[in-house]
Amino acid sequence: MSDGARSRRGLTIFFTGLSGAGKSTTAEALRALLRGRTTRPVMLFDGDVVRRTLWPELGFSKGDRDTNIRRLGWLAAEVASSGGVAICASIAPYARPREEVRAMSVPDGGFVLVHMATPLEVCERRDPKGLYARARAGLLPEFTGVSDPYEPPDDAEIVLDLTETTPDAAALRIVEFLQAEAYLDAPSR
């Protein structure tokens, strides 16, 4: 496939990482950047919002988390199959469902996994929603990083740590990667 064809093909950009790692804020910044750099439709699926609005019946057991990620992946694959760019921001703690999402996305578009590798202690210190404090107090069972595992990906195309960088700078790094890999046309000079 020529580089020009790749830049017009659908694409899924899938963020994974702990709560508080910067997934949603970086995904928002990325959406804003992409809307100015591509004519393809760009859709953002924030894991918390999608779960709350589309399938609130799901809990946080391993099976429900896997189902949540598979459904999110299906939404993204539908956007990609229509030539759009789907940005997904979800904890997605387990490797197997992330692999399934990649497989769903690849037949009709590209797939880029972004691991927000901000360390647990930084995420916990930030604790923007007070979730770590509640999990440490035993009020949130099966909380990723505290009482439930997070399986860091070994197949991420991009690894970012927001300990000492901003979401805007991280989003720009993703755009630079997308341009280098011909998912985006280089900006006109």
Image (tube, grey):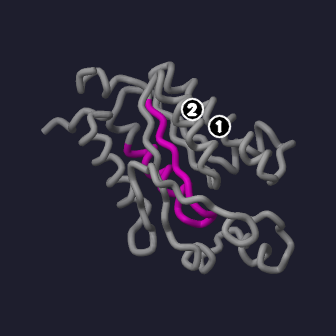
Q: Residue at x 65, y 73 (%)?
A: 127
Q: Position of residue 78 (x, y in %)?
A: 57, 24
Name the residue that disc number 1 marks.
Answer: 72
Q: Residue at x 47, y 54 (%)?
A: 154
For the residues labelled 2 and 1, the Cα–Cα distance comes to 6 Å
Numbered marks: total: 2
View extreme (left): residue: 189
- Residue 39 versus residue 161: which sits nearer the camera? 161
Q: Is residue 6 above or below residue 149?
A: above
At label 1, which amino acid type do we have?
A: Leu
Q: What segment is highlighted magenta in the picture?
A: 11-33
Q: Is residue 54 found left or right of 35 in the rendered image?
A: right
Q: Residue at x 36, y 27 (%)?
A: 39
Name the residue that disc number 2 marks.
Answer: 76
- Residue 166 versus residue 162: which sits nearer the camera? 162
Q: Is residue 94 found left or right of 138 in the rendered image?
A: left
Q: Is residue 182 found left or right of 157 in the rendered image?
A: left
Q: For numbered disc 2, what is the local secondary structure?
A: helix
Q: Is residue 145 found left or right of 177 in the rendered image?
A: right
The disc at residue 160 is none
Q: Position of residue 148 (x, y in %)?
A: 73, 64
Q: In which quarter of the view is residue 9 placed?
A: top left
Q: For numbered disc 1, what is the local secondary structure?
A: helix
Q: Is residue 21 magenta?
A: yes
